[in-house]
Amino acid sequence: MQKEEGKTSFVPALIALGTGIALGMLLAPKKGSEMRDDLTDVLRRNREKALGLAAKIAWEIPRRFKIAAGVGAAKGVAVEALHEARDGVASALRG
């Protein structure tokens, strides 16, 4: 299945964002206890967002597989019809 032009997957972007935030926090010049407190605060604030995103992804993946399966089935029917039409034209031309 081809991606629509101009659209990208948001999962890699979120992974990159999370990695950047984590690295930035880990490399910041703070004491370990302050860093743990900051990380705990960030995780608490973003927990609901992360759970919502996980639920959306869990719902979206099966839906996209169903769409892809439908497209694949339609393609198979179209190819079969094309072959039948080609064979019919060839037999009509032969006589």
Image: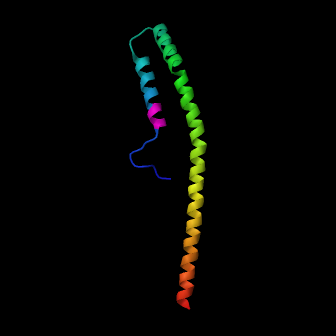
Q: Is residue 64 magenta?
A: no
Residue 17: percent from the left, percent from the top?
Answer: 43, 28
Q: Residue at x 57, y 71 (%)?
A: 81
In this rendered view, identify the residue nearer to me: 41 or 88. Answer: 88
Q: Main secondary structure of the magenta part?
A: helix
Q: Residue at x 52, y 88 (%)?
A: 93
Reply above or below: 61 against 75: above
Q: Residue at x 57, y 61 (%)?
A: 74
Which quadrant of the view contains residue 71? Answer: bottom right
Identify the coloring: rainbow
Q: Residue at x 57, y 80 (%)?
A: 87
Residue 14: percent from the left, percent from the top?
Answer: 46, 31
**Which stretch is magenta?**
10-15
In this rendered view, identify the residue nearer to me: 89 or 19. Answer: 89
Which quadrant of the view contains residue 13? Answer: top left
Identify the image quadrant of the C terminus: bottom right
In the visual, does 25 lie left or right of 59? left
Residue 60: percent from the left, percent from the top?
Answer: 57, 40
Reply above or below: 3 against 52: below
